[in-house]
Amino acid sequence: MSQKKHPCPPEILSSDVVASSKLFTVEALSLQFSNGERRQYERVKGGGRGAVMIVPITAENELLLVREYCAGTHDYQLGFPKGLIDPGETPVEAGNRELKEEVGFGANEFVNLKTVSLAPSYFKAQMHILFAQDLYPERLIGDEPEPLVVVKWPLNDWQSLLEQSDFTEARSVAALLLLQQHLLKEV
């Protein structure tokens, strides 16, 4: 059951850049809501390219994950391969490229599990979560500063993945649960 959307988003009265870096531009928005209320909001203005996360399963029914450094937490996290969509790429093309760069496999079959938003109160960013199967070996050079550790995880032991102390990224957790929902529908 879906609820009706709010009929009218607030009017943007002004927009000013208040900070910027190589990765982010922060805008201050002056808004007026339909009831006349005025508020200031800040948002991170994104590039609009979108991103992909791939949940690959091997012929041996193993999930392929990567352990990589995350600057935000200054430690290594276990998660699914992911990356930005390059200009001109579709989500599936970007997913196949990232899969080859990060785990050394391509895929012949992709299923879009869901497109999710990331912190929509603060920025417009979408991530396409893709299920990849019918894998074949192929490696592309990626942009990672060090080799990623590829971790194979038995699909039938997926619940214990949720108990791992370094498997905490919400997008990877959501991807795992979306995969399980998809696989149950196939049965």
Image (cartoon, rainbow, N blue to C red):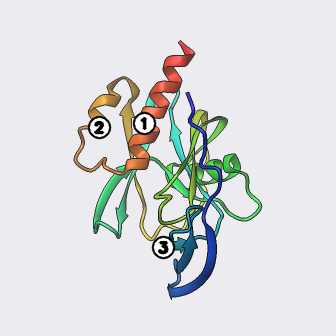
Q: Which residue is mark 3?
A: 41
Is 6 drawn above or below residue 25 in the view shown? above
- Camera-nearest residue between 94 and 147: 94
Q: Quadrant of the N terminus?
A: top right
Q: Quick one: label 3 or label 1, which is nearer the N terminus? A: 3
Local packing at callout 1 (Cα closer than 10 Å; few below 14, some 14-19, many 20+) is many
Is 113 drawn above or below residue 7 in the view shown? above
Marks 3/2 in contact by CB < 8 Å: the verdict is no
Which type of secondary structure does the marked residue at label 3 adopt? strand
- Camera-nearest residue between 106 and 158: 158
Answer left or right for 166 relative to 69: left
Q: Quick one: label 3 or label 2, which is nearer the N terminus? A: 3
Q: In which image quadrant can residue 25 be found?
A: bottom right
Q: Which residue is mark 1?
A: 176
Q: Which residue extends farthest top?
A: 187
Residue 4 seen in the figure: yes
Local packing at callout 3 (Cα closer than 10 Å; few below 14, some 14-19, many 20+) is few
Which type of secondary structure does the marked residue at label 2 adopt? loop
| Residue at 39% from the left image edge and 38% from the top image edge | 152
| Residue at 30% from the left image edge and 29% from the top image edge | 159
Amino acid at circle 1: Leu
The mark lying in front, picked from 3 and 2, is: 3
* Percent position of residue 131, x then y: 56, 36
Q: Which residue is mark 2?
A: 162
Q: Which residue extends farthest front?
A: 35
Amino acid at circle 2: Leu
Is 103 drawn above or below residue 155 in the view shown? below
* Percent position of residue 37, x then y: 51, 69
Which type of secondary structure does the marked residue at label 1 adopt? helix
Is 145 drawn above or below residue 175 in the view shown? below
| Residue at 55% from the left image edge and 58% from the top image edge | 83
Distance, label 2 to label 1, CA atoms, is 9 Å
